[in-house]
Amino acid sequence: MNFKAIFKENPLPATMLLFCTLLVCTFLFLILGEIFSKGLSALSWSFIFDAPKNGMTKGGILPAIVGTLLLTLITTLASLPIGIACAIYLSEYAKNNTTTQIIRAAIRNLAGVPSIIYGLFGLALFVQGLQLGTSILSAGLTLGLLSLPYIITTTEEALKTVPQSMREGALALGATQFETIRDIVLPASIPGIATGVILSLSRAAGETAPILFTGAAFYVTGLPGNLFQEFMALPYHLYMLTTQHQSIATVRPLAYGTAAVLIILVFMLNIVAFMIRNKFRKQLK
């Protein structure tokens, strides 16, 4: 059913839906226009591939870009296997009883916990408890905990979209439950899983509060050499340029440029999600 048919049958709800969509898109384009109009002047190859210089009033953001990419990679490795495994258990193996409902409610509540709480928890667990120190590893594991509730929830919802008849048909042909999940359920739900995972990781890549306590530094000379040292990241670098720098007016174009690069990176992650989703949808068809 297309929009014209929906508008013809329910004109008032459709009009309100269209108005809300246009309103949200208008504010989105205003924000993006403000950032890119003031940040394009700072964007250049030297801005992307050089390190900060002269008290961050000149130079580029290469250490922050590399730190953000490494942080996202560690977050993915820490959260993706556990999140998908938990979702498979809750959707395919766990009985629908009070215990399971409490677990699901707890996961959804964790998704609403402010990110700064995860930062304090990561400080207590990884930095002090496990003695990993303020490092890119501590920050990545903390963001992994932050991403887990979203990955579990979106993966479980994607698994639920697979018709029960497909499971019953595979079991009737003699496949075990594990084989049914591996060969039937997971391939059919990969588009939804990929979309949810990439969106969760995109959110984690833009977080500032969790890495503020666990490893992000104002300035680090050179690129990260190992996982146990402090690092620069785009969101924290942007925060410092806009609030803590001694010459905020001077570095404001660099701050807009940093924001533009961060948006571009997140946008690229979303493009990857859409490509994966479309690829598997075509294969399923």
Image (cartoon, helix red, strand yellow):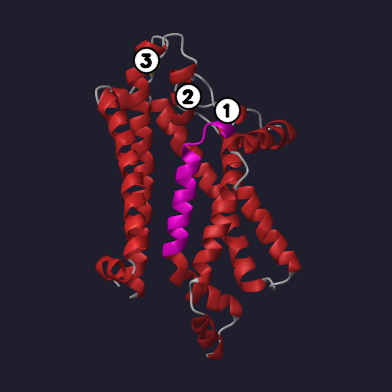
Q: Tell me, yes or no, if residue 12 can be seen here.
A: yes
Considering only vertical position in the picture, is 232 above or below 22?
above
Q: Are marks 1 and 2 in contact (CB under 8 Å)?
A: yes
Q: Residue at left 50%, top 38%?
A: 71
Q: Quadrant of the C terminus?
A: bottom left
Q: Magenta stretch?
A: 191-210
- Secondary structure state at the residue bearing disc 2: helix
The number of callouts visible is 3
Q: For the residue carrying disc 3, how many other residues have a C-alpha within 10 Å: few (<14), some (14-19), or many (20+)? A: some
Label 2 belongs to which residue? 239
Q: Amino acid at mark 2?
A: Tyr
Considering only vertical position in the picture, is 142 above or below 189?
above
Circle nearer the N terminus (1, 2): 1
Q: Amino acid at mark 3?
A: Val
Q: Amino acid at mark 1?
A: Leu
Q: Residue at left 57%, top 28%?
A: 212
245 or 98, nearer to the observer: 98
214 or 260, nearer to the observer: 260
Label 1 belongs to which residue? 212
Instruction: Give the spatial CA distance, label 1 vs label 3.
Output: 21 Å
User: Does 184 sit left or right of 134 as displayed?
Assistant: left
Q: Quadrant of the N terminus?
A: bottom left
Considering only vertical position in the picture, is 99 above or below 60?
below
Residue 15: percent from left, percent from top: 32, 58
Label 3 belongs to which residue? 251
